Amino acid sequence: MSQSPVDHSTLQDLVASTDMAFVQELIEAFLEDGREQIAAMRQSLASGDVLVFQRAAHSLKSSSANLGALELSSQAKELEQLARQGSLQGASESLERVASAFPAIEQSLREFGHGA
Amino acid sequence: MERSRPAEAGRLLVVDDNKVNRLLLGRGLEQHGHSVEFAENGVRALEMLRKGRFDLVLLDIMMPELDGYQVLEQLTTEPDLRDIPVIMTSANDELDSVVRCIEMGAEDFLVKPPNPVLLKARIGASLEKKRLRDQQRQLIRRFATPEVAEELLANGFELGGKFVDATAMFSDIRGFTSIAESQSPTDTIELLNTYYTLMFDAISGQGGTVNQMVGDGLMAIFGAPVPHTDHPVRAVRAALEMVELVQLFNQGQSVQGKAPIQIGIGIASGRVIAGFTGTQSRATYTCVGDTVNLAARLEAHTKVLGHPILIDENTWQGLDGQIPATEQEPTQLRGKSAAVRVFAVPLPAASPEPQGPR
């Protein structure tokens, strides 16, 4: 578990300040939004819509940080900064790295949600 | 229920396109006893704000449809919405954007996810400020005409006095004491109420503000707090209307076999010191200074000259020929070292040959 893509202490803090049912709801919201944000980035990358891309990356950065998916958050932040500079050059590769990391994050979050 | 402390719970709107952020913020706010509603973009936020009363908005910057900047911009243009405090919620790498939002009128900001203590403190402070502003607004509504209230709410409630160029008016009922002695107290109060209603209508219809009522007399000010550059014209128009209304009122009085009334009006223009005076529970917009004294003296002088409306030289110049006035003998007025030019404004029907300035 040392290589978990999710920082469990962030999640445990969240449970401590709220409750488990709320954190489960949060996880579901994150997974749903996260998939949409990745889809939106793919689509806007294809159509060249930098602003939509930036917004989706920004949103993913924010929600993944909230749930302790810190590596994902920093990748999303790089994508956001790239878009902010007005160019999506080289974004495709990073985006696919984000997309391929997502299932492991999902699994880790679900395990936490059911295990604690 | 704790009753000793003022309730700080409010109705809050959280605007964020990110569901995780909405849930987290909402949870934190509900834990502090606030009721929270959510909008996922700026368009929806504005719709909800126009429909319901909210005490505070927590606004994300980067959103689809309308972003945070556009929402802020729109809020400032809508009178019903511009006083709702807005706290920006941002990522910690967006501080440049936050500065821009604060310059655009946002009240404060919170970095997401907010620290619970900071969240509580900032929300509490904003709601408290809003509560004070609402109180102030109620105070304004209590004593100001709708027009003045609107002006004050738009441009702020300035307690401190300042010099303004304005026109002061004094009006009272001639021989009121003998009228009061000749009829029942009920009739007297009814007479005063009708009289005040008519006078208020005439004055506020010209953008003036009645700021004192004493017995059968009243004082009004034109050009402040609502700035009208043509305040002398407005004051004289109001005066003509007041005299006309009194004539109509007298027709009703005579039908009922009651005594007619006569009024005298003095008007002077110039620099006055204007501001709000009073206490927390009762305040009034008032004006003082030479101009105000002169208007009061001219009102008293109407008894001497038998003209119902007397104006000073500044007011006459301000009329610029738009309303005719005839110069009277210069008069030595109490409190004035030199003789003062005095002009009478004839009633339209009473004077077929008015003489304008110059």
Image (cartoon, coloured by chain):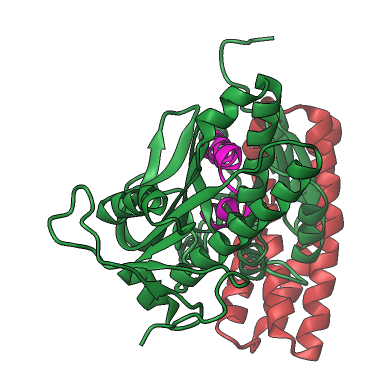
Chain colours: A red, B green
User: Residue B148: x percent and y percent?
Assistant: 55, 53
User: Residue B339: x percent and y percent?
Assistant: 18, 62
Q: Can residue B349 be seen in this view?
A: yes
Magenta-drawn segment: B123-152
Image quarter where the N terminus of chain B lies is top right
Asked if residue B198 is positioned above or below residue B307 in the image, the reply reads above
As drawn, is A16 to the left or to the right of B176? Answer: right
Q: Is residue B207 visible?
A: no
Viewer-proximal residue among B291 and B307: B307
The residue located at (82%, 74%) in the rendering is: A40
Viewer-proximal residue among B212 and B164: B212
- The answer to whether residue B20 is magenta is no
As drawn, is A22 to the left or to the right of B320? Answer: right
- The answer to whether residue B143 is magenta is yes
Please name the predominant secondary structure of the magenta segment in the image.
Answer: helix
Viewer-proximal residue among B50 and B304: B304
Image quarter where the C terminus of chain B lies is bottom left
As drawn, is B267 to the left or to the right of B124? Answer: left
